[in-house]
Image: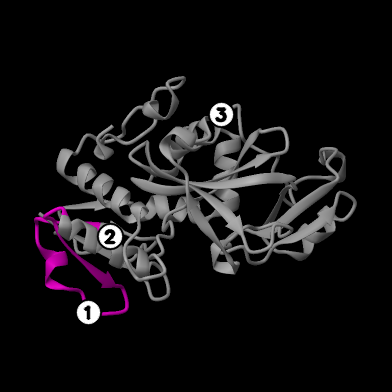
Amino acid sequence: MKMIFVRRRGLGHSSTKGLVQELHDLGITASIWRNDQRIPQELTQDETVAVRWGCSSTLPLSTRGVLNKASGIHSVNDKMGFLKTLDESPLQKGLLPVLTTAHTPLEIPPVEKWVVRPRHHSQGRNLHVVTSENVMGSLMRMEHGYARPLVQKKAEYRVYVVDGRVVNVARKTPGNPDDVAWNVAQGGRFDNVRWGDWPINVVDLACSVFPYTGLNFSGIDVMVDENDEAWFIEANSAPSLPFNSDGSTTYRHKCMAKALAYSVLENKGMLEYQQGEGYRGYIHPALGV
C-alpha cells in the first residue's frame, strides 16, 4: 500500500512533507503530487491511497482509495454554506447566528457588533467588523458575504480530528491579541496542549461538528469566550502543520501520520467518541492511549 498527498501550489508544502517523513518512519511508502505537475505513476496504481490536502483536482479512476473527497473539501471551503448546513442540523451548541442579504433589518438579532466576511475566505483575510446598524449595508456591498456576531474571545484552538477522534489540540497564540482573526499566517503560533489539559467543551464541539464536514480529517477551529463558552469558527480541509524552527517534524506531524496510517490500514470508518470521560473519550486510538 502507498499513500500520495495531493496538494496545490502554495498550499500544504511543509504539512505534507512532514507527514511523508513520519509515514516513512512508520514503514509506509508516501509521496507528494502537486496538481500543476505531471501525474505520477503511483497515483494510477491500484494499491495507492490518495490523500487530498485541500485540493479537489480530478484523480485517476484506478486510485485505490481517497481520504478527503472533493465534495467534502468543497463543502467546508464554502464557509457560509457550511455554516448554514450546521444551522439546519440538530446541533444545539457552539453555533452563532448567521446573517446574509436574505434577511431584513427586522430579523437582525440584537448584537452590538458583527464580523462580515465573503463566502469563501482563508488565512484571516477579508474580515470587517461593523455595528448592527451597518451590517446589512456591509453585506450588500460584499457580494455573497455573511455576518456572524463578534465574540470577545479569550482563547482559540485548532482541534485536529481524524475519522471522528482527536489526534491533537493546539492553542493559538496570536501575534496581536487585539486582532479579530488569530491566524498563524498573519503572525503568531500554535502551542501544543497536553492531553490532560484539553478543554473538553472545545474537543466535544469539534467532534460534534466533524461528521457534517464529509471529510476523513480536518482542523476544526473553536474559540472560547470570557464565560468559557465554546463557539465553532470553521473547518479546514488542509490544516497547517508547520515544522519546528530547526526544520524537524513536530509532535503534531507524528500524531497526524499515525492517525492517517490507522485510517488506511484499519479501515474502520467513523470512530465514535465518548462524552464525559475526559480526553480518553475523544483521543484517537492510533495514539495508543
Q: Position of residue 259 (x, y in %)?
A: 27, 45
Q: Which of 17 and 74 is in front in this view?
A: 17
Location of mark 3 (residue): 91
Q: Do the residues labelled 2 and 3 touch (CB within 8 Å)?
A: no
Badge 1 marks a residue whose secondary structure is loop
**How many numbered circles does the render carry?**
3
Residue 164, percent across and down? 37, 36
User: Between marks 2 and 3, how big is the CA–CA gap?
Assistant: 33 Å
* Residue drawn at the location 34% of the way across and 71% of the way down: 247
Q: Which residue is painted at 31% across and 34% down in the image?
A: 270
Residue 178 in sight in this render: yes
Give, as a single range, the part of the protein colored magenta: 26-50
Is residue 49 something one can see in this rendering?
no
Q: Do the residues labelled 2 and 1 touch (CB within 8 Å)?
A: no
Residue 80 at x, y = what percent?
Answer: 60, 51
Packing grade of label 2 (10 A; few <14, some 14-19, many >=20) is many
- Residue 289 in the image: above or below residue 276: below
Identify the residue at the far right of this view: 133
Mark pair 2, 1: CA separation:
21 Å
Horizontal side of 266 relative to 241 (left or right) equals left
Q: Is mark 2 on a helix, strand or loop?
A: helix
Q: Residue at x 50, y 56 (%)?
A: 190
Identify the residue under disc 2: 19
Q: Where is residue 53 in the image (x, y as percent from the top left)?
A: 35, 60
